[in-house]
Structure formats: structure tokens, C-alpha cells
Image: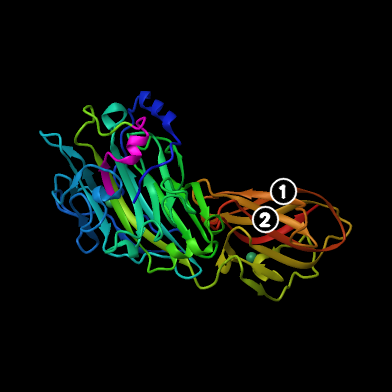
């Protein structure tokens, strides 16, 4: 499986020199409710008494040095023995799972690895799936951290019981980290190895430092979104997107091989040693004599959410009556009454109704809008956004065609929630006469980022 990683962040070893005095945040009381438009489909909050094992209804505990009949050392070169001992794997009584790596007097390492009983996590056709975990990496850095390799990831269901069909069945590394570096790696493994569409054994990855507090000193939220409509995989840390792979990049056949089976299962493990930590230790073996025993990966929750799925949001075109058609540019043009609409869905809000949760590629058309002699110099949009941190996009105005050059635009990020409505103005060049007005939605990421109640113009 996960073999070798690209060496993207060797220089981040310098972070070990920074004092790490920030206290770890405590566990959440519960799995957070889904964002608007999403439904929680599975989760484990790891509540239970101190010293108990995680729920056997949810999790399989992997033990030893590999699956029976599978690759040695779990296919990665990691050296630890996985056990089901509560010294290595337990609930802490405060709502967290703790996986702890331990070295015994003879120098042998033990740790733990679990995987979900369910192996059918996938988005509804045309919808989205999000896999999210709130995790604190082992709180150890520098030489004492060499060889630590915590991971939160998935494998395609056909891997279970076969063990030799990697990477064609797909592997999504939602969070990986080695050697106590302040970095999260997100990686896709696919197709064949070595080489192939994902450039194995490296995979298609990216990394970044954790926002705010380091990955080691605090909990962070790691999220992976699989969008079956947009055909994208997107990686987030604390709501900030840092990696995306599109179907176009790997090709339809490779994409289908990792998405058209029953789905994926989710894994949590804390490995010691192996190809990835060794690669970031100047290709020298890890762990080393100075590697400290007893540090834990702490997991507050793992949750799986889904959204949409009946109709791909970016290809839905609805023709409606248009009370504003032929009307004045200076009255509110109601989004829900647009002559044409692509994306989002009509729903109540802001004391009326609007088109909610529009993503990249959506648009609204208002036919025959009369600007008179104006001239109009202002554009206003009544919008709300509950988009995650770092998620944003543009609301653009175009005349005559939805591919015309925009005459004005508004950048929209989180307004404080999907019910937090604001009127945002933008300057536009002088407009007179009668035009078909297109309001278009453009973003570099696939998540819905804006709801619109109405738009209007001013002089
Ligand atoms: Ca919890
Ligand atoms: Ca409205």
C-alpha cells in the first residue's frame, strides 16, 4: 500500500526549533452537525469508558505485521507489531480514541490499526461524500519523533480479502504525517504501481502546515470530499482546501476503477518506520534510538456525510416564469424567479425565498432587463454563505451571454452561515438600455459557496 512519498516538505523540519507551548484543545462534546445541505451517514465519537476498546460494531482491529496472505509489513515497510491491547488502542473516557506507539525493553515497537466494518462509503450518484476526522497527531517533534507515521485514510472495498489489487482499487490518504513535522499530506493512490496515472509509488499528493497551532500540538479537522457530479476529490484541513484531483487528471477508466465498486473503508493507524518516514530522514531507517516511546494519535471523532445526489447541481437547468423579465433593473430581480437557472435549489430564507447553495458553474438568467437611460453604476446581490474556511467564489454579472466578459463581480466567502444574509455592492461600468442579465458563479473549488435571494442595480 502506501509506499513512498514525495519529499515535499523536508525543510519543514525546521519547525522543530519552534517552541511548542500551546495546550492541546479538549475533545468536542459530540460530532458536529452536518453543514446545511449535508446529512451525517455514519460516525463514531469515541465515547466510552476509559480503557475500553473502540466499538466492534464500527471497527475491525488489525493485528500483526500484515493481513493474512497480504504483503509483509502492511506493504509499506513499517516495522511495528499491531496489537489489540488497550496499551496501544483505547478510548480515553473523555470522548477520544488513543492509538499509542510503545517500545519494549528489547527494542520492539507495538501500536494499533483499525478499519471500519463498513466498506461501502461512496457518494450517492451525482452527489457528494465527505469523510472527516478531528485528530491530534502524536505530540512529539525532532529526533524523538523519527519514524512516527500517523494516518487517516481509505482503501477501496475490493482490497479487503484480496490484498494484491492495490492501487487500482483506490486509496485516499486524508491525513498522513511523518517524523513529527508540522505538515499534513493528502495523497491519492490509483491505477498501477510503479508508475501509472498516479505516478506510483509516490501518488498524487500535496502537503501544507496545519493552520494556527501545529499538527502535533493541537487537534485539527481533516476532511476529504468526493464529488460524483464534479468528478473531483478535494482535501481540507480546518476547512481550508489544500489539494484536489480531477477525473480529467487520471482519466475516466482509472477514475472508474476506484469509484465504481461498492465503496471505500476508513482506516486509522499509527505506524512506526517505513518508506515514507525513512524518505524524509535522508533515506536512513526509522525509528532511531532516540525515538521516544509512548506518544499517541488522538482522535476525537470520525464522521461521514453525504449531500445531494438526485440531480447534478451544475447541470440542472430549470426554466421558470419570470415576473421580473422585461422589468426594471432597479427593482429586486428574485433569484428564484430567474428565466433560467443552473445549480443550487430554490428554498425559503431571508423572509422570502432564494436559490440556495450554488457552486462553481451555476448561473441565473434574467431576460430583457430594462436599465433605461440610467446609467447603472452599481450592482447589489443579497447573499448568504456557510462555506467552510477558505472556501469562496465569485458572483459575476454579464450582459447578453453567460460567456460574455463580466461587467462586475463580487467575491463571496463565509458570511456567518447559510442564514446570515447580506447585501453586497459592486461597482459596474455604465449600463443603459435593455439586456439579458446573466449572474454567473465561478469558484476554484467544487463546494457550494453562496445562496442568492435577489440581485438589483443602482445608479
Ligand atoms: Ca469525541
Ligand atoms: Ca428571493
Taking depth in this image into account, of 285 and 395 the one nearest to the observer is 285
Read off the residue under disc 1: 426
Residue at the limit of the structure toward the right, as seen here: 373
In magenta stretch: residue 272: yes
Q: Which mark is residue 377?
A: none
x, y (%) of residue 243? 49, 47
Q: Which mark is residue 381?
A: 2
Q: Does 21 appear above or below 400? A: above
Q: Is residue 267 left or right of residue 188?
A: left
Q: Is residue 23 left or right of residue 196?
A: left
x, y (%) of residue 223? 41, 51
| Residue at x 75% of width, y 59% of height | 403
- Crowd rating for badge 2 (residues with CA inside 10 Å; few <14, some 14–19, many 20+): many
In magenta stretch: residue 155: no
Q: Can you see residue 178? A: no
Q: Which residues are magenta?
A: 269-283
Amino acid at each position: 500500500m502506501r509506499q513512498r512519498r514525495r519529499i515535499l516538505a523536508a525543510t519543514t523540519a525546521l519547525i522543530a526549533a519552534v517552541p511548542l507551548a500551546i495546550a492541546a484543545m479538549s475533545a468536542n462534546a459530540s460530532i458536529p452537525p452536518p453543514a446545511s445541505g449535508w446529512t451525517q451517514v455514519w460516525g463514531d465519537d469515541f465515547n466510552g469508558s476509559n480503557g475500553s476498546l473502540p466499538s466492534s460494531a464500527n471497527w475491525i482491529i488489525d493485528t500483526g505485521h500484515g493481513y493474512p496472505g497480504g504483503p509483509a509489513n502492511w506493504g509499506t515497510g513499517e516495522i511495528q507489531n499491531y496489537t489489540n491491547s488497550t496499551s496501544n488502542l483505547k478510548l480515553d473516557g473523555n470522548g477520544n480514541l488513543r492509538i499509542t506507539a510503545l517500545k519494549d525493553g528489547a527494542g520492539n515497537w507495538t501500536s494499533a490499526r483499525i478499519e471500519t466494518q463498513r466498506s461501502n462509503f461512496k457518494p450517492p450518484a451525482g452527489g457528494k461524500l465527505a469523510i472527516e476526522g478531528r485528530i491530534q497527531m502524536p505530540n512529539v517533534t525532532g529526533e524523538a519523533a523519527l519514524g512516527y507515521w500517523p494516518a487517516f485514510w481509505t482503501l477501496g472495498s475490493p482490497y479487503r480479502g484480496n490484498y494484491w489489487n492495490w492501487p487500482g482499487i483506490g486509496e485516499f490518504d486524508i491525513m498522513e504525517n511523518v517524523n513529527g513535522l508540522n505538515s499534513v499530506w493528502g495523497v491519492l493512490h490509483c491505477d498501477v504501481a510503479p508508475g501509472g496515472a498516479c505516478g506510483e509509488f509516490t501518488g498524487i499528493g500535496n502537503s501544507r502546515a496545519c493552520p494556527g497551532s501545529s499538527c502535533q500540538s493541537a487537534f485539527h479537522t481533516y476532511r476529504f470530499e468526493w464529488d460524483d457530479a464534479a468528478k473531483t476529490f478535494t482535501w481540507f484541513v480546518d476547512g481550508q482546501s489544500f489539494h484536489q484531483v480531477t477525473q480529467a487528471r487520471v482519466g475516466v477508466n482509472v477514475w472508474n476503477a476506484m469509484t465504481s465498486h461498492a465503496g471505500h473503508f476508513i482506516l486509522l493507524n499509527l505506524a512506526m518506520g517505513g518508506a515514507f518516514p525513512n524518505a524524509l530522514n535522508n533515506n536512513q531507517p526509522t525509528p532511531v534510538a532516540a525515538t521516544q516511546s509512548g506518544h499517541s494519535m488522538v482522535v476525537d471523532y470520525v464522521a461521514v456525510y453525504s449531500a445531494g445526489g438526485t440531480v447534478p447541481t451544475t447541470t440542472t437547468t430549470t426554466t421558470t416564469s419570470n415576473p421580473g423579465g422585461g422589468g426594471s433593473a432597479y427593482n429586486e430581480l428574485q433569484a428564484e424567479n430567474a428565466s433560467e437557472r443552473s445549480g443550487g435549489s430554490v428554498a425559503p430564507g431571508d423572509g422570502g425565498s432564494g436559490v440556495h447553495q450554488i457552486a462553481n458553474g451555476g448561473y441565473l438568467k434574467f431576460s430583457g432587463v430594462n436599465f433605461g437611460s440610467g446609467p447603472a453604476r452599481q450592482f447589489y446581490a443579497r447573499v448568504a454563505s456557510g462555506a467552510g474556511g477558505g472556501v469562496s467564489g465569485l458572483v459575476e454579472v454579464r450582459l447578453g451571454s453567460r460567456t460574455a466578459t463580466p461587467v462586475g463581480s463580487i467575491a463571496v466567502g463565509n458570511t456567518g452561515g447559510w442564514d446570515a444574509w447580506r447585501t453586497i455592492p459592486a461597482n459596474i461600468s455604465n449600463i443603459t438600455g435593455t439586456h439579458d442579465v446573466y449572474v454567473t458563479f465561478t469558484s476554484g473549488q467544487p463546494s457550494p459557496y453562496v445562496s442568492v435571494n435577489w440581485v438589483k442595480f443602482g445608479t
